[in-house]
């Protein structure tokens, strides 16, 4: 049975020493997040993940969800009890305003809890995760009546939420959608159509499911300009807030998937279902993008989460599995063989995963902090800078962390040899579960194109210029610090590669757009490598300061410095390869005629 331990100490170090969240105590909710409160929240969240979510992960994968004859769906044994514990602990509303029953704490704390939950049980964590995304969309775009009707029950966890975009004939190109909404004359609409791949679309863990559905109002313009967003509850809500009669929405089937078996991925049929417009007519994508951006960041966290749990189990196995002798002589002469962790190639694998995990966690939390600033700061300039950061880094967090997260799950599985390929050790599940994160909420190729086509040139490239300037300033300010020279030098080389790639696109993509398309994924990963390198430089600065001050564990700080140097020496130089690929352009990529494939 796989095991999991929440990295609470690492998160506390990042929040307090690297990101300095106490500097934001002027923001609403941050003053309430005292050091004692933050530690208690993370400790309890970690305990919930370890004790309630993780034990039902492997059994839930093996059992899966079952659709009954009446269209209802049963989740795996133990899932409801674990979900109820999550809801009862108030985790759903951790960062939701208190007026709707939440605790109003910073989103950055909720992001840390999302990582714990995703590592412990990704399929189960998706039920509250999607609900939190729906809550975010309604908070921004819902009417006061909609907020009053739905949010308290969703924050309580008594009701859950979903996002309904994809249809059988359209995924990324939402302008092709066919689901129709006809006005009923009383302010509501009648929705008819079919949605597919709807995570948590039907299940037995909440008394109502609040679907957020995009559809086209009769007579609306074609394409994305004619899309509207609707709230469509599984059960209609009575005037007193209680659950009423069944709405015209049902689960036609559940998908048989490669992974996340414990999450009910449904085909949803809307047969004249009653729904209410969220926000303005024909501006549904603006409203849905709130939920989609929340979801994309959460999916990046899922990639990190699967990488972390796979790493932990690979480390435990590598310390225990006896095979061969160390190249430098026996390390356990009293045993028949040495544990495989003595072998350099095993160490390389583990160090690559570890170095990624720590930097990715920092990048995720740094981005979550910007989300808090966007939603809570009263300073318009500060909000704009934070919003720029989120726009630039959202495709990177989603695309890079899920690509690497899957690769790391595979690498961790490899250390088990044949034992990794059979189901009882659980490594196969981590690989299968991690795979979906590269696909949903916008496949990673789309994330790369979004970065190149929309985020990079937006506002004259302001977000990228700000990021490049911030990293360059850090290097300049710490270039003479002996403790950081192993970090600032490689970071400067990588930053030069990123600047070179950015300039190459500016000079070569306008006249030939295929150059941008051919290099987009490499650029996304190049930016991710530099962003994580910057995170490692900041981690190293904080670790060196801890050592000088004599606070905390010197051994833990030394481990971070060694891991960071490994990243700088063995992983960050990949930026040069990415730059070389980008500069080749699109010629050979696009040269073959279609018939030649």
Image (cartoon, helix red, strand yellow):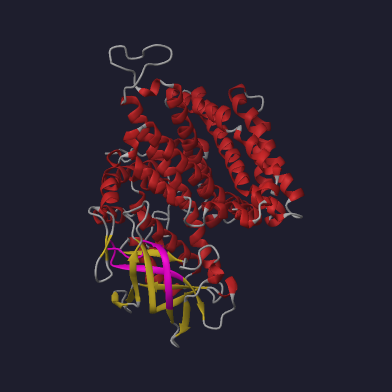
Extreme bottom residue here?
Answer: 185
Residue 25: x and y, percent?
Answer: 50, 47
Is the stretch drawn in magenta largely helix, strand or loop? strand
Q: Quadrant of residue 328?
A: top left
Residue 535: x and y, percent?
Answer: 55, 37
Residue 248 is left or right of residue 286, and the answer is left
Q: Is residue 508 visible?
A: yes
Q: Is residue 195 magenta?
A: yes
| Front in this rendered view, residue 23 or 583 | 583
Q: Is residue 18 magenta?
A: no
Q: Residue at 36% across / 39% down in the picture? A: 6
Residue 564: x and y, percent?
Answer: 52, 29
Residue 216 is left or right of residue 336, and the answer is right
Q: Quadrant of the N terminus?
A: top left
Question: Which region is colored magenta?
Answer: 192-213
Q: Quadrant of residue 418?
A: top left
| Front in this rendered view, residue 304 or 476 | 304
Q: Residue at 37% across / 34% down in the picture? A: 312
Against 280, is 29 above or below?
Answer: above
Extreme front residue here?
Answer: 596
Against 14, is 270 above or below?
Answer: below
């Amino acid at each position: 049975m796989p095991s999991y331990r929440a990295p609470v100490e690492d998160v506390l170090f990042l929040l307090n020493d690297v990101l300095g969240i106490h500097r934001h105590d002027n923001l609403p909710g941050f003053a309430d997040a005292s050091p004692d409160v933050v530690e208690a929240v993370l400790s309890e969240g970690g305990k919930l993940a370890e004790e309630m979510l993780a034990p039902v992960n492997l059994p839930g994968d093996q059992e899966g969800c079952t659709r009954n004859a009446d269209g209802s769906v049963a989740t795996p044994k133990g899932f409801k009890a674990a979900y109820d514990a999550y809801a009862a602990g108030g985790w759903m509303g951790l960062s939701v305003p208190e007026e709707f029953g939440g605790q109003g704490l910073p989103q950055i704390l909720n992001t840390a809890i999302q990582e714990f939950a995703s590592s412990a049980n990704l399929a189960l964590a998706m039920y509250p995760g999607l609900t939190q995304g729906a809550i975010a969309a309604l908070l921004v775009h819902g009417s006061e009546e909609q907020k009053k009707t739905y949010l308290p029950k969703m924050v309580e966890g008594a009701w859950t939420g979903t996002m309904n975009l994809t249809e059988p004939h359209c995924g990324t190109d939402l302008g092709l959608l066919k689901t129709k909404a006809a006005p009923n004359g009383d302010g509501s609409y009648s929705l008819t159509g079919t949605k597919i791949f709807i995570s948590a679309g039907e299940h037995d863990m909440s008394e109502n499911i609040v679907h957020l559905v995009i559809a086209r109002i009769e007579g609306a313009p074609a394409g994305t300009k004619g899309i509207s967003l609707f709230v469509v509850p599984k059960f209609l809500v009575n005037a007193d807030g209680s659950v009423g009669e069944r709405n015209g929405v049902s689960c036609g089937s559940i998908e048989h998937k490669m992974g996340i078996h414990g999450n009910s991925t449904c085909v949803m049929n809307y047969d004249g279902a009653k729904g209410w417009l969220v926000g303005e007519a024909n501006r549904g994508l603006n409203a849905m993008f709130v939920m989609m951006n929340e979801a994309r960041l959460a999916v990046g966290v899922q990639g990190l989460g699967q990488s972390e749990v796979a790493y932990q189990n690979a480390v435990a196995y590598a310390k225990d599995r006896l095979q061969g002798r160390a190249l430098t002589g026996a390390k356990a002469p009293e045993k028949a063989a040495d544990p495989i962790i003595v072998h350099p190639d095993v160490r390389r694998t583990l160090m690559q995963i570890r170095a990624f995990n720590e930097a990715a966690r920092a990048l995720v939390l740094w981005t979550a902090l910007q989300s808090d600033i966007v939603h809570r700061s009263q300073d318009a300039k500060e909000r704009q800078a934070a919003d720029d950061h989120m726009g630039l880094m959202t495709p990177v967090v989603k695309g890079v962390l899920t690509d690497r997260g899957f690769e790391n799950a595979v690498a961790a599985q490899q250390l088990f040899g044949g034992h990794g390929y059979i189901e009882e050790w659980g490594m196969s599940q981590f690989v299968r579960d991690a795979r979906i994160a590269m696909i949903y909420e916008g496949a990673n190729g789309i994330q790369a194109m979004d970065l190149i086509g929309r985020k990079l040139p937006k506002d004259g490239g302001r977000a990228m210029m700000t990021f490049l300037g911030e990293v360059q300033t850090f290097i300049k300010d710490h270039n003479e610090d002996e403790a950081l020279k192993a970090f600032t030098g490689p970071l400067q080389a990588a930053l030069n590669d990123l600047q070179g790639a950015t300039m190459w696109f500016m000079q070569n993509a306008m006249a030939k757009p295929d150059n941008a398309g051919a290099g987009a994924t490499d650029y996304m990963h190049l930016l991710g490598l530099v962003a994580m390198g910057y995170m490692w430089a900041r981690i190293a600065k904080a670790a060196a300061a801890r050592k000088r001050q004599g606070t905390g564990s010197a051994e833990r700080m030394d481990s971070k410095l060694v891991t960071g140097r490994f990243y700088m020496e063995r992983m960050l130089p990949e930026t040069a390869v990415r730059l070389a690929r980008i500069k080749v352009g699109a010629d050979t990529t696009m040269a073959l005629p279609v018939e030649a494939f």
